[in-house]
Image (tube, helix red, strand yellow):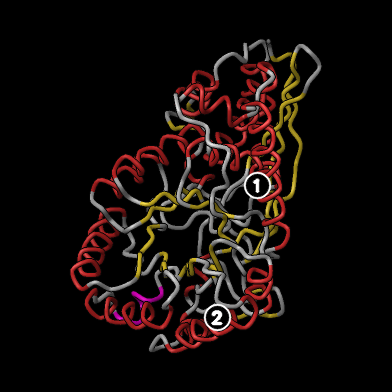
Amino acid sequence: MKIIDALFAPGLTGFYFDDQEAIKKGAVHNGFWYEGKPQTPGFKRIRQKGEAILVMLVLENGEVAYGDCAAVQYSGAGGRDPLFTAEDFLPFLEKEIRPKLIGLEVDSFRNLAYIFDRELTVNGKPLHTALRYGLTQALLDGVARAQKKLMAEVIAEEYQLPLIPEPVPIFVQTGDDLYTNADKAIIKRADVLPHALINNVEEKLGRQGEKLLAYLKWLKKRIFELAGEEYRPVIHIDVYGTIGLIFANDLEKIADYLSILGQEASPFKLRIEGPVDMGSLWGQIEALSKLREIIDQRGIPVEIVADEWCNTLEDIKLFADYRAGHMVQIKTPDLGGINNVVEAVLYAKKKGIGAYLGGTCNETDRSAQISVHLALATRPDQMLAKPGMGLDEGLMIVYNEMQRTIALLKRRGG
């Protein structure tokens, strides 16, 4: 089955591009807007609309395979590729990529993904991660449609994985609406919650960490109030390196604070994502490796999750090799081709470190659906409900795609 045409169109994502550096330095909210000057190259404003490029591959049999090019909310931060906009990349796709797609046989996802993710270069560099992300999504869908299989089945067969028709735990994020959206997550019995977006010391963490501690106390009480004793979600909070800021990256003091959080969270398991941001790959690996060692030696009931500077497949392998954290986030758009997402989950599991198939609120419905298929085939410890920060929409998209796929897998297995 060949590709006979390739179409590209501008699209919107489920959230926005935000200048993380400006926010960390105290950018002030004005409604949903941020006041101030951007700090990250490429940004014209601190908050900009999230953009995508929609990829459509027309197959010989008339079917169309879909994938969406998208980039993370905090583009340009933590060593990531720069800001991604449709107007910058649509002409390139039409001129350079469309001719390379037309006429291709969609017979092997791994082979096709290798071409567009690893072989194609521009001025000696790989394509922007967002382009590789969307193109490989569409190629996986194309192979699945050509073979009349589910995308999860294609991944499982090509990577020789057992396909288990059971759900993967879903992690929801509240965004800035920490309280109402936490209620929504509890009512809908999310497996992992609430993320909480602790990305500012003054507004959300507190100079002594007191604001996060108060929120954690409220959250535990609220879970019991709304759901009783039987519901036991994992509590997972992303702090974007802000704990390191208030303790000057003193790992012993950070561990002391994490111990307090862990005790307060009991009886729920607690995960803290991005406790420090050391500003470089090796600085981050060294700090998280040492912090994990301290936590494990002291028996602190907290798992730390690597995020910043853990961007590419190669990065993830290094974090796993050095045990830099208890879990690594595999932030799907940052890895480029989704073939790298598959390999990252499998490598983390092989090394005995937790695998979190993440992503960003700034993706699309299509990239979220395809991520579900990757999760069902590779079985990470959890996956992110995405896109958006409204909670309901992202959870609906991921949960429903997971349930559809599981039902179809069970039917085929039966």
Horizontally, residue 312 falls left or right of residue 299, namely right
Residue toward you, 319 or 162: 162
Q: Quadrant of the N terminus?
A: top right
Classed neighbour count for the residue bearing mark 1: other residues with Cα under 10 Å, few (<14), some (14–19), many (≥20): many
The reply, left or right, for residue 124 in relation to residue 104 is left
Write the start and end of the magenta stretch as one range. Answer: 242-247
**Relative depth, front residue between 225 and 375:** 225
Q: Which quadrant is the C terminus positioned in?
A: top right
* Within-10-Å neighbours for mark 2: few <14, some 14–19, many 20+: many
Residue 134, position in %: x, y?
62, 36
From what the image shows, is residue 292 above or below residue 349?
A: below
Residue 240, position as x, y percentages in the image: 44, 68
What residue is disc 1 on? 85
Q: Where is residue 341? Give x, y as percent.
A: 47, 39
Check the image and report above or below for 58 versus 394. above
As helix, strand or loop, the secondary structure at mark 1 comes to loop
**Which residue is situated farthest in the right direction here?**
62
- Taking the image as shown, residue 4 lies to the left or right of residue 367, namely right
Q: Which amino acid is tagged 2?
A: Leu
Task: Count the labels in the image.
Answer: 2
Q: Amino acid at mark 1?
A: Thr
Secondary structure beneath dot 2 equals helix
Between residue 164 and residue 284, name the one nearer to us.
Answer: 164
What type of secondary structure mainly makes up the magenta span?
helix
- Kindly identify the residue that appears in the image at 58 percent across and 71 percent down: 37
- Name the residue carrying label 2: 219
